[in-house]
Amino acid sequence: MALEKPSEVEPSLAWAGFRHILNNDLVILWAIVFIAWLLTIWAAATGHEHWLHQQVLSNRVPLLLELLLFLAAWQVMTAAMMLPSTLPLVRLFIKASRQQPKPGIVLLAFLGAYAAVWTGFALIALLLDIGLHGLMQHWHWLHYRPWIIAGLTLILAGGFQFSSLKEQCLNACRHPLSFLTHHYQRGLQAAWNLGMRHGLYCLGCCWALMLLMFAVGVGHFTWMIVLTVVMTLERTWKQGRQLTPIVGITFLAWGVLVVFHPSWLPNLLGG
């Protein structure tokens, strides 16, 4: 049998390698994280960062478009901030579900449920944010002291660091193998349920920290970096348990200072 010419073999090998990369789910997920951060950096570098702040959106566009823009910004932010600390469990899930029929669809169900949990939280937080801004318009004392909101949010986030719910949810997130061993089942519905369960544990860990995004403006680049580092270290670093109370004390002290004097509220939180 005649050998194939090198010119015919090399493109075939290159395409096979490219398909192998595309079939690597973790590579695709890391690419999503990378693209999400690129979009955030682009928005900050080009001066479009303010369009991702829900306070600005509510003043400039119709309600439906505001909601769509907000959800788009939130999905980018969730991919950038939450996926990195979730990848250890995702990696184990991919290995466990590899023998299932259509493992790619199963993975999409898992990730879709996870995203649905955080989207639900975002919608609730947005409604509360809109209500709070409405209250500020009618309560003149609070209207002229907007730093109170940021200060109280910092105190809430700091105090939650010491709660038993935070510790319980962190324990589940810090041990992905144990979590998967106890809750993994085959099937599309089971993958969705597992994604919902993991998303709720993740939400239980980080909802108070993510609530800070509404105090500073969704999509605030600097604050995104700070919170991403904190949440990723808390959930994946071996010394994360020691970090949690340090973050709590820092936010509590910072929040109290902000409440009593707005000069402690730097541009980092100015949104």
Image: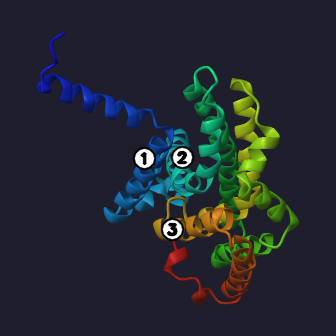
Q: Give the numbered dot on residue 196.
A: none
Above or below: residue 21 compared with residue 82: above
Residue drawn at x 25%, y 32% is 14
Front in this rendered view, residue 16 or 86:
16
Classify mark 3: residues with Cα within 10 Å, few (<14), some (14-19) or many (20+): few
Quadrant assignment, res 12 = top left
Q: Which residue is mark 3?
A: 225
What secondary structure is found at the residue carrying circle 1? helix
CB atoms at circles 1 and 2 under 8 Å apart? no
Disc 2 marks which amino acid? Gln
Residue 77 is situated, as x and y percent measured from the top left of the image, at 52, 54
Front in this rendered view, residue 174 or 148:
174
Disc 1 marks which amino acid? Ala
Disc 1 to disc 2, C-alpha distance:
15 Å
**Which label lies toward us, 3 or 1?**
1
Q: Give the numbered dot on residue 75.
A: 2
**Which label lies toward us, 2 or 3?**
3
Q: Give the numbered dot on residue 31.
A: 1
In the image, is 27 to the left or to the right of 217? left
The N terminus lies in quadrant: top left
In the image, is 245 to the left or to the right of 79? right
